Image: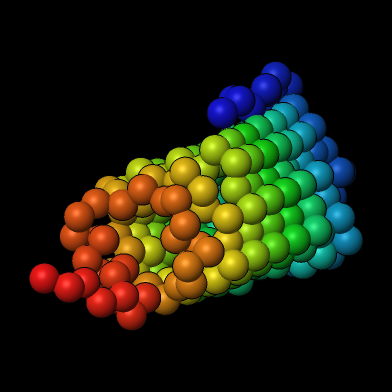
Amino acid sequence: MKKPIIKLYAEIDIVKALKEELYCNYKIINKEGNTILKDEILFDSCELEKIDFTKYKIKKLEFIDCIINNCDFSNLEFEKIIFKRCQFKNCKMLGISFIDTSLNDIQFEECILSYSNFSNNKFKNINFINCQFLDSTFFDNITTKLKLDNCNFMNCQFYNNDFNGVDFSNSNIDNITTDLKSVKKIFINQNQAISLVNLLDIIVKE
C-alpha cells in the first residue's frame, strides 16, 4: 500500500478551511461553527483531526494523500468518487455508504463501520485493521489486494463479491449471510469452515 504524500504549510481550523477554500497541504483541526454549505470538496495532501463532518452540508467529499484521525463521517454517502493514498484512524463511520466508488491505497485502522453499505466498489490495496463492521452489507464489490486484520463482520451480508485470495481467518464472520461467489477462494480457519458449511446447506457425510 502506498502511503500518503503530504507537505504541510500550516495548521488551520475547519471553519477557516471551508470559508476560504483551503483544502491542500494543511493540517486541519476541529472548531465549532455555523453550518457551511458546500457542493464539492477535495482535500489533497492534508491532515484532518477531530472533525465532525456530519455537521457540514457537503454534497461531495473526496480525499487524496490525506491522514484522517478521530473524525466522524457517520451516515454520510460517498458515491461515484475516488479515494487515493489515505489513512483513516479511529474514525466513526456508522451507517456510512460507499457506492460505485474507487478506493486505492487506503488504510482503515480502529474504525467503526457498523451498519455501513459497500456496494459496487473497486478496492485496490486496501487494509482494514481492527475495524468493526457489525450488520454491514457488501454487494457487488471487486477487490485487488484487500488485507483484513482482526476485523468484526458479525451479522454482515456478503453477496456477489469478488474476494478471491482475501484472508478472513483472524476476523469474526459469525452469523453472516453470503453466497458461493463471495466465499470462493477466500482463506478461513477450521472453525469458520464448519460455520460456512452449515450456512451454505452443505452436508458432510461421516
Q: In the current view of this chain or complex, which residue is farthest to the bottom? A: 201
Could you say which is closer to the camera, residue 159 or residue 82? 159
- Identify whether 135 is placed above or below 166: below
Q: Quadrant of residue 98?
A: bottom right
- Does the rendering let one see residue 59? yes
Q: Residue at x 27, y 48 (%)?
A: 170
* 7 on left or right of 178: right
The residue located at (34%, 60%) in the rendering is 152
- Quarter of the picture holding the N terminus: top right
Where does the image place residue 120, in percent across and percent down from the top left? 69, 63
Q: Residue at x 29, y 70 (%)?
A: 197
**Nearer-the-camera pick, 27 or 60:** 60
In this orientation, which residue lies closer to the viewer: 83 or 61? Answer: 83
Decide which of 24, 33 is in the foreground and name it: 24
Please state if 71 lies on the left or on the right of 121 as rendered.
Answer: left
The percent position of residue 70, horizontal first and vertical second, equals: 49, 48
Quadrant, the C terminus: bottom left
**Above or below for 19 versus 33:** above
Number of numbered labels in the structure image: 0
Residue at 31% from the left image edge and 68% from the top image edge: 196
Vertical relation: 105 (above or below) 15? above
Does residue 90 appear in this view?
A: no
Across and down, in percent, residue 146 comes to 52, 43
Q: Residue furthest front?
A: 205
What colour scheme has been applied to the protein in the rendered image?
A: rainbow
Name the side, left or right, on which 196 lies relative to 93.
Answer: left
Tell me where residue 15 appears, x and y as whole percent: 73, 51
